[in-house]
Image (cartoon, helix red, strand yellow):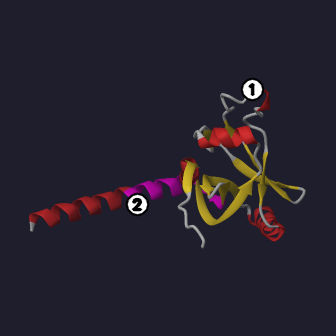
């Protein structure tokens, strides 16, 4: 019998939603050491400036900061070391083609546990221009105003 367990989100890259249009999302495993996993379980991870690249047919994430585990002594690794992401070769080649030709970029969107494994959600992203960010902010504000007025009208009747 299969256990259904909710994904426990550890960290999200909220900056990515502001800076990029997310076209597609992919799930990838991540190659970690034991003290890094313990530090992630404690919630000591930051995805803010992280990005992914494809090098020699393998996918890596850079600038993902995993703080050293406080009880890890000599087994702690460099907090900003490049970490290998685990995906099928066919998916990596597809992403490589899109990134090279259409100018997309790969950004880690969130880090979460799926069962006992740490997974990374990688987004295929296209950068926003300043006017796109302004349009998104104006749309959010308009939706807030509409919701506020609908709520007021509901209580007036």
Mark 1 residue element:
helix
Mark 2 residue element:
helix
Residue 73 is covered by the magenta coloring: no
**How far across and how far down the image is residue 58, in percent?**
85, 57
Residue drawn 67% across the image and 38% down it? 66
The answer to which image quadrant residue 104 occupies is bottom right
Chief SS of the magenta region: helix
Image position of 7 with respect to 70: above or below: below
The answer to which image quadrant residue 27 occupies is bottom right
Residue drawn 54% across the image and 49% down it? 14
Q: Is residue 57 left or right of residue 127?
A: right
Examine the rendering and report whether any part of residue 64 can be seen: no
**How far across and how far down the image is residue 157, in percent?**
9, 68
**How far across and how far down the image is residue 114, in percent?**
62, 59
Residue drawn 67% across the image and 32% down it? 69
Residue 134 is covered by the magenta coloring: yes
Q: Which numbered circle lies on residue 139?
A: 2
Q: Which numbered circle lies on residue 73?
A: 1
Residue drawn 34% across the image and 60% down it? 142
Front-lying residue, 143 or 89: 89
- Residue range in magenta is 123-140
Q: Which numbered circle lies on residue 153?
A: none
């Amino acid at each position: 019998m299969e256990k259904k367990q909710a994904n426990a989100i550890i960290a999200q890259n909220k900056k990515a939603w502001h800076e990029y249009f997310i076209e597609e999302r992919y799930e990838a495993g991540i190659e970690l050491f034991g003290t890094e996993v313990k530090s992630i379980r404690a919630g000591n991870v930051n995805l803010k400036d992280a990005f992914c690249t494809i090098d020699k047919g393998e996918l890596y994430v850079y600038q993902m900061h995993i703080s050293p585990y406080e009880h890890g002594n000599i087994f702690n690794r460099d907090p900003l070391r490049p970490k290998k992401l685990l995906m099928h070769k066919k998916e990596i080649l597809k992403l490589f083609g899109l990134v090279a030709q259409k100018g997309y970029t790969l950004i880690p969107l969130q880090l979460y546990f799926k069962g006992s494994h740490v997974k990374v959600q990688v987004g295929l992203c296209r950068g926003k221009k300043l006017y796109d960010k302004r349009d998104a902010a104006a749309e959010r504000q308009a939706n807030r105003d509409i919701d506020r007025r609908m709520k007021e009208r509901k209580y007036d009747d």
